[in-house]
């Protein structure tokens, strides 16, 4: 028996992001539930969010982001041999979103699967894609984080409808250009805590998202900065060398608390939560795509990703901007 020959390291070739056109402001929500702009900003830091139209499916959102990343990579569709979609909000569990997206983008017969690690999904998918390339199972992987959370929200529940939103972000993962090149995707540091699984959940197919916000806040602001530092150590990167820190966009207060404890004051901190809301697995790739497009990040910059969410699942890794 023979084993596939892989790559000694992997890298990201390109990013892509997509947000629906419809903007829902805090004032809009105040017309629907007992809330206000000041109340929402003071608690979660959100000013507005994007919500998909009624005819805009999760596959539509994922395909839009994936198509942008594929185009930016310069690769033809036939160069992609694995598609991974991180999501926890499909309309139904079957068929998977990944195979549908692949067909829409003209990617013929790739491996295709969905991955559910909730808000940590994109980092989980990035890690598995990197491992697949290093092992030789795939050469180029399209990784997408996509969510249509609006279809799983009770719009009369002010504790959740003010937070969650829709969108997708994507990246193309491939081998390093030369065998001796340094890797562009560092080791993942991941884990979970099933004891807290009941803090964010959907009870059944006829239910909506339920979240115990205070419990999640306490856990995130105390447990996650050591994970972030461990990811830097695993990659051999000093936090002082980071150009940016992109955590999951869950809550502005959580983001600011973790950033303070990370010990990387020079790093730009993504705060897309303000205008994008919490898009779960899409939040990190959306922030990456936006920062790259607006030239806030340059080629070769080191960026720390930190994702966390329902499960409780979490993952962190250092990447290099292409």
Image (cartoon, helix red, strand yellow):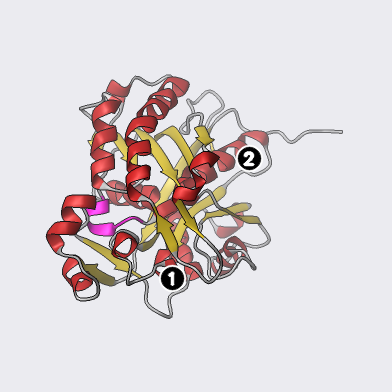
Residue of label 2: 132
Judge whether 288 appears above or below 93 on screen: above
Q: Residue furthest right?
A: 1
Residue 182 visible in this rendered orientation of the protein = yes
Determine the residue positioned at 28% across, 64% down.
158
Magenta stretch: includes residue 276:
yes
Judge whether 211 appears above or below 217 on screen: below
Determine the residue positioned at 43% across, 71% down.
151
Q: Quadrant of residue 316?
A: top left
Judge whether 103 appears above or below 263 on screen: below
Determine the residue positioned at 44% across, 67% down.
152
Determine the residue positioned at 32% across, 72% down.
156
In the picture, the disc for residue 48 is none
- Return the residue nearer the eye: 124 or 142: 124
What x and y, as percent, mark residue 154?
38, 70
Tag 2 secondary structure? helix
What x and y, as percent, mark residue 33?
24, 71
Quadrant for the N terminus in the image: top right
- How much space separates mark 1 and mark 2, taking CA atoms? 32 Å
* Bounds of the magenta segment: 272-278
Residue of label 1: 151
């Amino acid at each position: 028996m023979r084993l596939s020959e892989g790559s000694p390291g992997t890298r990201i070739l390109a990013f892509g992001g997509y947000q629906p056109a419809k903007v829902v402001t805090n004032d809009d929500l105040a017309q629907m539930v007992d809330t206000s702009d000041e109340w929402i900003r003071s608690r979660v830091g959100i000013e507005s969010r994007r919500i998909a139209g009624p005819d805009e499916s999760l596959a539509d959102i994922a395909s839009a982001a994936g198509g942008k990343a594929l185009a930016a990579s310069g690769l033809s569709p036939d160069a992609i041999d694995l598609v991974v979609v991180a999501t926890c909000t499909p309309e139904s569990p079957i068929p998977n979103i990944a195979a549908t997206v692949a067909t829409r983008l003209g990617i013929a017969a790739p491996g295709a699967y969905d991955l559910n690690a909730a808000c940590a999904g994109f980092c989980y998918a990035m890690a598995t894609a990197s491992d697949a390339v290093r092992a030789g199972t795939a050469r180029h992987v399209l990784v997408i984080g996509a969510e249509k959370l609006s279809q799983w929200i009770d719009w009369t529940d002010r504790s959740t409808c003010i937070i969650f939103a829709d969108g997708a972000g994507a990246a193309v993962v491939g081998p390093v250009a030369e065998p001796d090149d340094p890797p562009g995707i560092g080791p993942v540091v991941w884990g979970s805590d099933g004891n807290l699984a009941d803090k964010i959940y959907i009870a059944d197919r006829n239910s909506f998202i339920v979240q115990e916000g205070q419990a999640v806040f306490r856990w995130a602001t105390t447990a996650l900065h050591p994970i972030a530092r461990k990811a830097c150590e695993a990659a051999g990167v000093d936090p002082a060398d980071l150009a940016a820190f992109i955590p999951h966009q869950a809550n502005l207060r959580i983001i600011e608390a973790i950033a303070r404890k990370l010990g990387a004051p020079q790093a730009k901190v993504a705060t897309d939560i303000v205008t994008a809301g919490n898009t779960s697995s899409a939040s990190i790739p959306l922030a990456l795509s936006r920062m790259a497009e607006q030239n806030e990040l340059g080629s070769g910059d080191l960026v720390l990703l930190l994702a966390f969410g329902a499960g409780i699942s979490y993952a962190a890794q250092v990447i290099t901007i292409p």
